[in-house]
Image: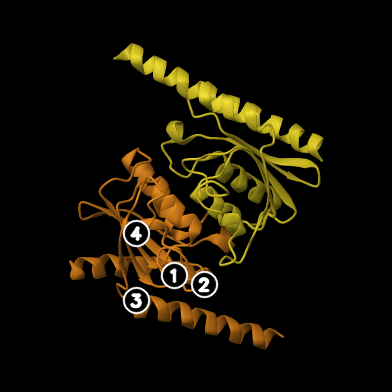
Chain colours: A orange, B yellow
Amino acid sequence: MKCMHEKFMRMALEEAGKAEALGEVPIGAVIVKDGEVIARAHNLRETSQNPVTHAEVLAIQEASRYLGSFRLESCILYVTLEPCVMCSGAIIMSRIPHVVYGAPDKKGGTVDSLMRLLDEPKFNHRALVTSGVLGDECGERLTLFFRNLRKKRKKEV
Amino acid sequence: MKCMHEKFMRMALEEAGKAEALGEVPIGAVIVKDGEVIARAHNLRETSQNPVTHAEVLAIQEASRYLGSFRLESCILYVTLEPCVMCSGAIIMSRIPHVVYGAPDKKGGTVDSLMRLLDEPKFNHRALVTSGVLGDECGERLTLFFRNLRKKRKKEV
């Protein structure tokens, strides 16, 4: 199970790399159903200037198109960073039963860090959560990205 | 101010009517900047089978395209029903400063009913909220829709 989770998180990391190549914050997501990847996406917020284009929301929409349903039953969402409030909401709306994430997001994560929206009895859907899969690698990718960004900005000033 | 809010909420209700004509739950949204409508949308979840196509998210994306920015500063979002967790998240991600809604959603609303996500100190954005604008009319629209749906389903059984 650990091995399977790492395999798909590595694909999500590849997606994060595609975001980084575009100057985007490196976050990637993959959706798997019955062991098969049915969607993969990366953060495109800056490129698209569309606030909804987080990796998770893009992957959810791609998986919905593939399955022809807004209900992503029996799917596992892999994402390199703990989902934010919008993405947690999209997970609830699409009824994804299992979310696996890499690094925690202490400032914006709403799965474990700021709140626990995927384990909230008030909602009509809850998801199983597995955290920390390739967590160090996912986290370092982001740390390095922001460190380089600060260096670049310092040079520009 | 009340008059202006009612004027735009009436447009959101017109959008709700378009959703209803498609057999969708009648929810509509309008985004206004400097007194001008820059986006209008209605719920398309069943038609699109895309879990993200709530009226608010569609309107937010349209407004972002119009402004060429994911930041919807100085915008007011009008929506006939209290936003859910995903839409509250999209409001936070797009930095909308003011949300006006019609009817409360006791089962899924996360602005006032289940939680108060738009007034949450843990997030880096908070929005002013005005509730109950044409609230009875917005609520009755939904009540009637679900009553008719139940009748229709009863006939089909």
Tag nearer the camera, 4 or 2? 2
Compared to A62, does B105 lie above or below?
above
Residue that mark 1 sits on: A113
Residue type (three-letter) at the residue carrying disc 4: Val
Residue type (three-letter) at the residue carrying disc 2: Lys
Contact between marks 2 and 1 (CB within 8 A): the answer is: yes
- Which numbered disc flags the more N-terminal residue, 4 or 1? 4
Contact between marks 2 and 3 (CB within 8 A): the answer is: no
Chain of the residue that carries numbered disc 2 in the rendered image: A
Image check: B13 left or right of A1?
A: right
- Secondary structure, mark 2, is loop
- Which numbered disc flags the more N-terminal residue, 2 or 1? 2
Residue type (three-letter) at the residue carrying disc 3: Gly
The quadrant holding residue B135 is top right
Residue type (three-letter) at the residue carrying disc 1: Ser
Task: Give the residue at x 50% y 49%.
Answer: B114
Task: Give the residue at x 29% y 52%.
Answer: A97
Same subunit, tags 2 and 1: yes
Tag nearer the camera, 2 or 3? 2
**Badge 4: how crowded within 10 Å, few (<14), some, or many (20+)?**
many
- Looking at the picture, how far across and down is residue A110, in whole percent? 45, 63
Tag nearer the camera, 4 or 3? 3
Q: What is the CA distance from the residue labelled 2 to the residue labelled 1? A: 8 Å
Task: Give the residue at x 32% y 66%.
Answer: A11
- Looking at the picture, how far across and down is residue A33, in whole percent? 25, 51
Residue that mark 3 sits on: A135
Residue that mark 2 sits on: A107
- Which numbered disc flags the more N-terminal residue, 4 or 2? 4
Q: What is the CA distance from the residue labelled 4 to the residue labelled 1? A: 22 Å
Tag nearer the camera, 4 or 1? 1
Residue that mark 4 sits on: A30
